[in-house]
Amino acid sequence: MYRAKTQGALDYAFFDPALDSAAVEHSRRVAELRTAVDVGQFTLDYQPVVDLDEHGITGYEALLRWQHPTRGQVAPLDFIPLAEETGLIVPLGRWVLREAGAYGKVLYEEHDDMRMAVNVSARQLQHPDFVGHVQQALDESGFPAHCLILELTESVLLASGDRIDQQLALLKQMGIRLALDDFGVGYASLSYLQRLPVDIVKIDRSFTTSIDSPATDLMLLKGIIDLGNALGLKVVAEGIETRAQHEIVRGLGCHGAQGFYFGRPAPIPARTLAPVD
């Protein structure tokens, strides 16, 4: 029945044993994920975000990791879509907010301008109590709202409606900053950029991976950076892995950057950067 529904105009489908196997496997994965949420099999890694002019760490992005008891670390792409599909992303997202807030508080006590970024899905924003979840995490940790950055993906843009718009407005009133993640890879990003109350644009790594190659045309990347600057947004380049890439995005007017060149995700990341040659 479900296969027939996904066929669009076709209203029938023949049974295939592979469909039964896929359904059983899907149910098993959902059960495992539900157990992981219940017993706490998740951890957070933190990757630094740097200021390109000062070459200093301005904050961290919290990255979710699933430590499976038999399969080891499960890649986010292998469980985040399933968490969103089942709604488990809501309790999982609340845990991430609490954990990231607690570590953010530690960083804030050392440097009061340190930021903490947390990824948020459309499913979370559609939850009627999401703003309350964020406020509770801040209250429990003592982490100030103006130091929290919520990163939104294009899925949020495509699901944008009255409820999400209201949620974003309330978050902004709290002093929380909003970032548009993976900018440039989807058709909706540019048209929604002015309408959403975002403060930061994070350029997708697909625009920076080969910018240090002699054959690379930098006009598109420069156009994105210039657009962000013209709109008064902070522009952060993702996926920076070499010194040459660092110098290029800084020369194009990018304010910040993130990538292996500055630091890999780690449970307890380094607080300082190595000097640039």
Image: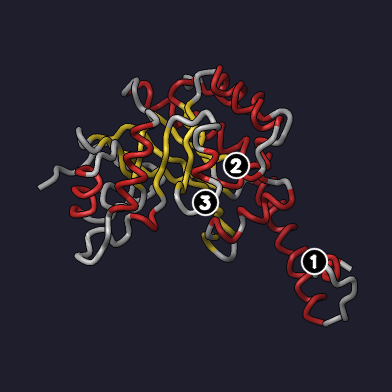
Residue picked out by circle 2: 157
Q: Amino acid at mark 3?
A: Arg
The answer to whether residue 161 is left or right of residue 145 is right
For the residues marked 2 and 1, what is the alpha-carbon distance in whole angstroms? 24 Å
Is the residue under label 3 in contact with that under label 1 (CB below 8 Å)? Answer: no
The answer to whether residue 33 is left or right of residue 174 is right
In the image, is residue 7 above or below residue 197?
A: below
| Secondary-structure class at tag 1 | loop
Q: Nearer the viewer, mark 1 or mark 3?
A: 1
Judging depth in this view, the residue of 199 and 74 nearest the camera is 199
Q: Amino acid at mark 1?
A: Thr
Is the residue under label 1 in contact with that under label 2 (CB below 8 Å)? Answer: no
Q: Earlier in the sequence, mark 1 or mark 3?
A: 1
Q: Earlier in the sequence, mark 2 or mark 1?
A: 1
Q: Residue at x 48, y 39 (%)?
A: 180
Asked where in the image residue 267 lies, by quadrant, the reply is top left
On the image, the x and y values in percent for residue 227 come to 37, 39
Q: Nearer the viewer, mark 3 or mark 2?
A: 2
On the image, the x and y values in percent for residue 189 come to 51, 45
Residue picked out by circle 3: 65
Q: Amino acid at mark 2?
A: Leu
Q: Residue at x 66, y 25 (%)?
A: 166
| Secondary-structure class at tag 3 | strand
On the image, the x and y values in percent for residue 277 come to 9, 48
Q: Name the quarter where the N terminus is drawn.
A: bottom right
Q: Earlier in the sequence, mark 3 or mark 2?
A: 3
Residue picked out by circle 1: 6
Instruction: Tell me if mark 1 has few (under 14), some (14-19) or many (20+) residues whose alpha carbon lies within 10 angstroms of its own.
Output: few
Q: Residue at x 58, y 26 (%)?
A: 137
Judging depth in this view, the residue of 238 and 110 nearest the camera is 238
